[in-house]
């Protein structure tokens, strides 16, 4: 689950005095440590939609300021074939001040993202509102795009950026790894020259890693970590909702609270992406085999024991 940013915490505190909300079955209860996960899992497994929806609503009431929980409820309603109710929940989210899609949290839920493009949702009051806000954002993005073209080279990171000694996810660790599938190792990142093979069932040592990426230009919409109307470049992911960001020749850590669209610019959505897409980052890991041979692999999914959180 994404980390709570400052804006989400403020929403959560405001929810203490929130009145009864029919869309979530009652008033907010404020219990961040809701313990119904096991029951949710059982209801999901048995496709007991009524029970699962009731649990999702209870989960939302226990943390009304957590957008992720609301999106889980919307996603469950869609799975249960209740799109009209899902649309009403999204409208309640908007009324409560959430950044409703296309937003960063929604991108964890492909089903929700698809629903937001359906005629049913687009015909709703919120759907019509979002189309107008989307036009404003697109105009803003075009202006940032023109500014990006004028940005001198010395104000940009390298087009092909390499983050050294990078372990790019929460609880990521190097060290003693297991091999889940036979994996060829090459001489260096990007090379085709095979130097050895990590055999399934063996153990290897992950020495270090590099993330090879194209920096993501983002237009800044509020004054905060970065000056409003400036352009920064998001680099490698650090886990727990943070990334390295290049700004004015420096690299700083910042929350990944940016999106394709920010309809409510705030700390929860401080910037918008400028380009339609950038190439996917590649994580290269330097591996030492039991026989001492050292090589590189970009297939980290073929190894285990690299997550300290299990």
Image (cartoon, helix red, strand yellow):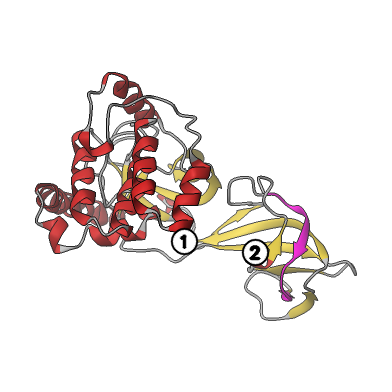
Contact between labelled residues 1 and 2, with CB atoms less than 8 Å apart: no
Give whichever of 253, 182 is nearer the camera.
Answer: 182
Question: In this figure, which residue is indicated by the disc labeled 1?
Answer: 214
Residue found at x 23% / y 53%: 141
Residue 186: percent from the left, percent from the top? Answer: 72, 75
| Farthest residue, direction top | 17
Q: Is residue 177 visible?
A: yes
Left/right placement of residue 49 relative to residue 91 reads: right
Q: Residue at x 29, y 52 (%)?
A: 77
- Residue 176 located within the stretch drawn in magenta: yes
Residue at (70% x, 70% y) in the render: 188
Q: Is residue 296 above or below residue 148?
A: below
In the image shown, does 147 or 196 lie closer to the viewer?
A: 196
Measured as percent of width and height from the top left, residue 191 is found at: 66, 76
Q: Secondary structure at mark 2?
A: helix
Residue 45: say if magenta.
no
Q: CA distance from mark 2 to mark 1?
A: 19 Å
- Residue range in magenta is 173-185
- Residue 289 horizontal/vertical position (percent): 84, 67
Q: Which residue is mark 2?
A: 300
The residue drawn where x is 70% and y is 54% is 306
Above or below: residue 250 compared with residue 30: below
How busy is the neighbourhood of tag 2: few (under 14 within 10 Å), some, or many (20 plus)?
A: some
Mark 1 Cα-neighbour bin, 10 Å: few <14, some 14–19, many ≥20: many
| Tag shown at residue 308 | none
Mark 2 and mark 1 lie on one chain; the one further toward the N terminus is: 1
């Amino acid at each position: 689950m994404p980390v709570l940013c400052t804006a989400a915490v403020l929403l959560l505190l405001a929810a203490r005095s929130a009145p009864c909300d029919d869309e979530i079955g009652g008033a907010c209860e404020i219990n961040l440590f809701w313990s119904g996960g096991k029951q949710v899992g059982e209801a999901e497994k048995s496709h007991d939609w009524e029970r699962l929806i009731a649990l999702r609503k209870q989960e939302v009431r226990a943390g009304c300021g957590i957008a992720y929980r609301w999106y889980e409820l919307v996603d469950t309603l869609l799975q249960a074939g209740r799109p009209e109710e899902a649309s009403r929940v999204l409208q309640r989210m908007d009324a409560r001040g959430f950044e409703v899609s296309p937003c960063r949290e929604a991108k964890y839920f492909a089903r929700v993202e698809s629903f937001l493009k359906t005629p049913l949702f687009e015909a709703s009051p919120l759907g019509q509102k979002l189309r107008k806000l989307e036009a404003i954002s697109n105009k803003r993005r075009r202006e940032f795009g023109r500014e990006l073209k004028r940005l001198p080279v010395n104000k940009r990171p390298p087009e092909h950026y390499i983050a050294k000694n990078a372990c790019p996810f929460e609880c990521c660790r190097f060290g003693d790894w297991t091999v889940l599938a036979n994996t060829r190792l090459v001489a260096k990142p990007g090379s085709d020259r095979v130097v050895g093979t990590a055999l399934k069932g063996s153990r290897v040592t992950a020495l270090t890693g590099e993330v090879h990426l194209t920096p993501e230009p983002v237009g800044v919409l509020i004054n905060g970590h970065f000056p409003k109307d400036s352009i920064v470049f998001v680099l490698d992911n650090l886990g727990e909702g943070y990334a390295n960001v290049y700004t004015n020749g420096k690299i700083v850590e910042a929350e990944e609270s940016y999106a394709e669209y920010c309809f409510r610019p705030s700390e929860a959505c401080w910037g918008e992406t400028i380009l339609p897409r950038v190439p996917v980052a590649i994580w290269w890991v330097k591996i030492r085999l039991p026989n001492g041979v050292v090589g590189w692999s970009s297939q980290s999914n073929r190894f285990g024991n690299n997550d300290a959180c299990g």
